[in-house]
Image (tube, rainbow, N blue to C red):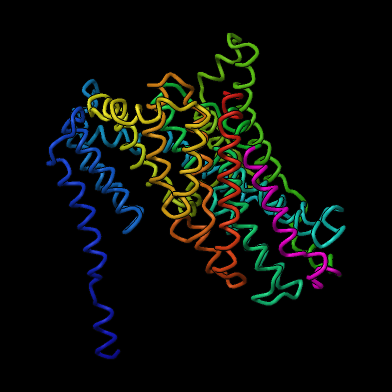
Amino acid sequence: MSTLAQAAKGKIDAKYIVKSLIGVAIMILFRFLPPLDPITPAGMAIIGEFIGMIYLWVAVDMMWPTFLGIVMFGLDAQVIYPNSWQQSGVYEAGMQSFGNWIVLFVLATLLVVYALEKAGTLRRICMWFITTKVARKSPWSFTFMLILSGLVIALFLDVTPAQFFMLGIAHEMFKILGFNKGDRWPKYVVVMITFTAVIGFTMTPICHTLPILWMSIYSNIVGQPYSILSYVAAGMPIGAIIWIIMMVWMKFVIKVDKDVPELQNIQWEKIEAMKPGPMEKREKITIVISILLLLCWVVPSIISLVAPTNPVYTFMARITDSGWLFLAVVLLAVIRVDGEPLLDLGEAFQKINWLPVVLLAGIMMIASAMGENPTGIPAWISANIVPLVSGLSPFAMVAIIAVLCVILTNIANNVPVGIIFVSAGVPMCLELGINPFPLALAVCVGANLAFTIPPAYVPIGVAYADPYCNGKTVFLNGLVMCIVSAIICALLCYPIANLVS
């Protein structure tokens, strides 16, 4: 090895250290600033930890700042939660972070989705769509069904795994159909798959980390659990309209029926060869358990609308969504086919993505604390933010916040955008005496609709770097989707969310 190579190998990353020290300094020094009345010293400390952790998550690393935040939060935890039974602040910090129910909920959801993916169910869904009679009618029908299958999968799978899963199938299909890198159709398929994964991520809170996070902040502030059914009832039509407009736009842009000869004579036997084999017993059982889980999530909300005092509703609600989810994990781990569990927990814990779990732990700890009265932050919002919008109608207020979320998330990371708007907006709605659910939903949808540049959202960076695509195509079409999304969210978030909540 040359001397130059040896020096490079042992080189210390000075920029990384400097950025890390800046974030740490913010977390430590902010507590010593004079508090802005009525914010308390503990509130100033929490704000510093909030700003410092977001800076570190965005600029340095998405993992270790959470653990530093737990230590820092522990210094003030007993002031913020004076009635806690914890003997030491850092233990309270642990309970508010990794002990938070939403963190465990996301972890268990990742395990169930892993079981479905390993069983081959997700691939089976995709291949069913693109081999139907509808898909065989024309090149555009084939394209439409391919992207529609991605939307169905994106409703139940986290955004980045959904994108990677669909891109893997698409890349294999490009080769089979004889496309080359840079060809027009593959380029736009990558864009559509990416945008579809983003849109699907906003439509349900099922296994979708950020909607779950932001709705959980909403729940903590209002003091009651959010309804999955209400979210789906509002998120699905809004997302579906945005997606349909995207597909109409893409149809006229790529003109696939005229300009893509490779799709005129598809060799369907090669496409059929990509399908999984007959459904085996382990996959059938995994699907049944997953369907039962979805029913246990949805049925209580339906019963509550028609018979809120029914003992069935009381029993199911007492177990909670998390309880049914944990029972599903247990069943998947206990039931064995040919000596192998449907869900090998040891294997699953090694394969699942721990990033959303760790990120959520830190966010929930800080976001929940910001809503506690001992910090003085809720009182400051009431005194300084509420008067600014007190003259606006609920519709106008939600519309403005929805548009701001869409714009900001396309130029900045969506995590802080969502946290800030929910943490500040929901208490503001309560102070004004209006329903906070439409605002929370507008944030959950709008703050995730990032289509333009890589810093805004991981899937956009993946599309920029995809060998069949390029950044210019993503950016230009992303601008169109940004405008469309802002308009649709502004018009529909308040009336639809208000109707179903």
For image coordinates 33% across by 58% down, the residue present is 59
Q: Is residue 284 visible?
A: yes
Above or below, 263 relative to 75? below
Q: Is residue 374 left or right of residue 213?
A: left
Quadrant location of the N terminus?
Answer: bottom left
Q: Would you say 143 lies left or right of 482 here?
A: right
Q: Position of residue 161 (x, y in %)?
A: 55, 54
Residue 119's place in the image compared with 422, above or below, is: below
Nearer to us in this view, 466 or 273: 466
In the rendered view, tell whether residue 381 sits above or below residue 27.
above
Q: Main secondary structure of the magenta part?
A: helix
Residue 433, placed above or below residue 188: above
Residue drawn at x 50%, y 33% as measured from the top left? 398
Instruction: From the top left corner, tell me how far across and down residue 4 is, in percent.
Output: 26, 88
Residue 119 magenta: no
Q: Nearer the viewer, residue 183 or 219?
A: 183
- The answer to whether residue 341 shows anywhere in this view is no
Left or right of residue 171, residue 216 in this image: left
Q: Which residues are magenta?
A: 238-264
